[in-house]
Amino acid sequence: MAQLAGVSHQTVSRVVNRHPSVAADTRARVLEAIRELDYAPNRVAQSLATRRSKTAGIIGYGTTHYGPSQMVAHIEAGLKARGYGLVYAAVSDLSVEVLREQITTLRDQLVAGMVLITPVGGGHLAETSDLIHVPFVMIDAMLGEHVPSVVFHQHHGARLATQHLIDAGHRAICEITGPLEWSGAKQRHDGWLATLAGAGVTPGASVEGAWTAASGCLAARQLLERGEHFTALVVGNDQMALGAIHALREAGRRVPQDVSVVGFDDIPEAAYFDPPLTTLRQDFGALGQQAVELLLARIATPDAPAHQRVLYPQLIERASVAPVTAAAR
């Protein structure tokens, strides 16, 4: 190819790798030679030479649930749009041993960088960082953690949800959380408590769910069977809110006339619940974009200082919240 184009092998390499310091007429000759020879770059050979491929790795936990699945989908789309291939490892166990095994597998495939969606146990970063050896970005790290990461401000989202109910006159507010081993669920719970304390409202009972509609239904039944008095529920995600609304209806409680309900995530179906669900929208498209931008920036400049990018949930008001009645108080 170099001979056909009348240039050196180094110049061909520069053109193939889109190096800017190639004259326009020289670039045109090389590209014409590439077309004539039907040349395709050998990315495997390139990765062996540079010890880096144009491939990124994702380790994802909990991806059967809406939030993590959306994170993976948007990060994958963002990487592909920038010409990156993807190696994906779904894990159902976030033990140190499993993480170390998956990190080693990705590293051995010469990935240029990694995205770690590890919302439980802080990703065990201290016990695994010695293996990574490539730029990485964490998703759902703890707010304020000094690692390259992109996070939603879950505490802020819970504050918006709880304050919305307080502003509607509710003072008997219970909660259904996600699994509290998840950092996001714990931060939402802490935000609920802090907002009630700031308003001088005694917290109602809190029951832990498992992100599913069935667990939300079971948690709401537990609150009802225990005789808890509440006029409002803050629920850790929309699926559990759907289950909670079902349980309330079973018990003859109307939503929102008797009990107001706020969810989290704004899944596509939330606007079509009966009643349409007030919820906190998390922009997973923006999270994917930010994660890809941060990862590629770190690939380009591996020694850049670590920083965290924070996204804020948005309150979406629908018909599942109503002002509390004097009788319900």
Image (cartoon, rainbow, N blue to C red):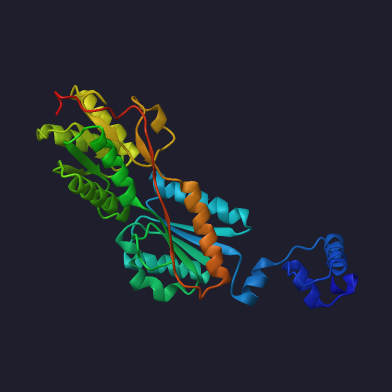
Q: Is 249 placed above or below 71 here? A: above
Task: Give the percent coordinates (x, y) of residue 216.
Answer: 26, 37
Q: Is 164 placed above or below 16 here? A: above
Q: Does residue 211 appear in this view?
A: no
User: The C terminus lies in which quarter of the figure?
Assistant: top left
Given residues 93 and 288, the one toward you in this image is 288
Q: Is residue 198 left or right of residue 121?
A: left
Q: Is residue 118 left or right of residue 30?
A: left
Q: Residue at x 59, y 75 (%)?
A: 51
Given residues 319 and 220, the one toward you in this image is 319
User: The N terminus lies in which quarter of the figure?
Assistant: bottom right
Q: Does residue 114 appear in this view?
A: yes
Task: Give the percent coordinates (x, y) of residue 187.
Answer: 28, 53
Total labels: the figure holds 0
Image quadrant assignment for residue 50: bottom right
Q: Is residue 309 left or right of residue 205?
A: right
Q: Is 198 placed above or below 248 here? A: below
Task: Give the percent coordinates (x, y) of residue 173.
Answer: 19, 38
Q: Is 93 placed above or below 42 here? A: above
Q: Is residue 320 left or right of residue 90?
A: left
Image quadrant assignment for residue 161: top left
Given residues 181 and 204, the one toward you in this image is 204
Task: Give the percent coordinates (x, y) of residue 111.
Answer: 54, 67
